[in-house]
Image (cartoon, grey):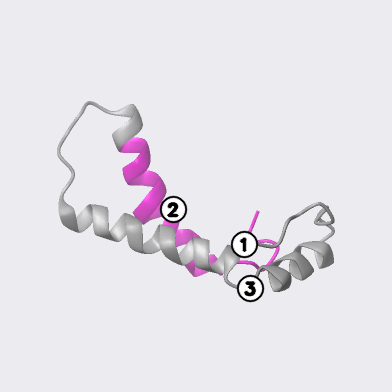
């Protein structure tokens, strides 16, 4: 998990869980309902922040993953 490996913070993980995963599950698994622009922008904001954590400094992420014992040798730096 990205939090356990130090790639994203626990706080970001908790916020993303609440602000990205929960609305995503609602859209996928619940009866259709209109999503407000505010909610869409919030989901976009946190998804973007997570992607930045994972890809803005890809060599540093790979170093963290290797230090955590993950198999990062075949990861392609973007």
Distance of label 2 from label 3 (alpha carbons): 23 Å
Distance of label 2 from label 1 (alpha carbons): 12 Å
Dot 2 or dot 3, earlier in sequence: 2
Q: Give the x, y percent position of residue 53.
A: 55, 68
- What is the chief secondary structure element of the magenta stretch? helix
> Residue 6 in magenta?
yes
Q: Give the x, y percent position of residue 6.
A: 67, 68
Q: Is residue 72 above or below residue 35?
A: below
Q: Residue 17 has which mark?
A: 2
Residue 5 vs residue 11: left or right? Answer: right
The residue that disc 3 covers is 57
Nearer the observer, 49 or 56: 56
The residue that disc 1 covers is 3
Name the residue furthest front: 78
Instruction: Name which residue lies at 32% across and 44% down.
Output: 23
Q: Nearer the viewer, mark 3 or mark 1?
A: 3
Q: Secondary structure at mark 3?
A: loop
**What range of the chain is rendered magenta?**
1-26
Instruction: Name which residue lies at 57% across and 71% down.
Output: 56
Crowding at label 1, few (<14), some or many (≥20) Cα neighbours within 10 Å?
few
Dot 3 or dot 1, earlier in sequence: 1
User: Which quadrant of the rendered structure holds the C terminus?
Assistant: bottom right
Crowding at label 2, few (<14), some or many (≥20) Cα neighbours within 10 Å?
some
Q: Give the x, y percent position of residue 13.
A: 50, 60
Distance of label 3 from label 1 (alpha carbons): 16 Å
């Amino acid at each position: 998990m990205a939090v356990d490996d130090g790639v994203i913070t626990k706080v970001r993980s908790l916020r993303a869980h609440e602000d990205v995963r929960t609305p995503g599950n609602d859209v996928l698994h619940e009866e259709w309902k209109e999503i407000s622009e505010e909610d869409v922008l919030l989901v976009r904001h946190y998804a973007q922040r997570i992607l930045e954590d994972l890809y803005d400094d890809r060599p540093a992420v790979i170093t963290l993953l290797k230090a955590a014992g993950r198999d990062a040798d075949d990861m392609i730096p973007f």
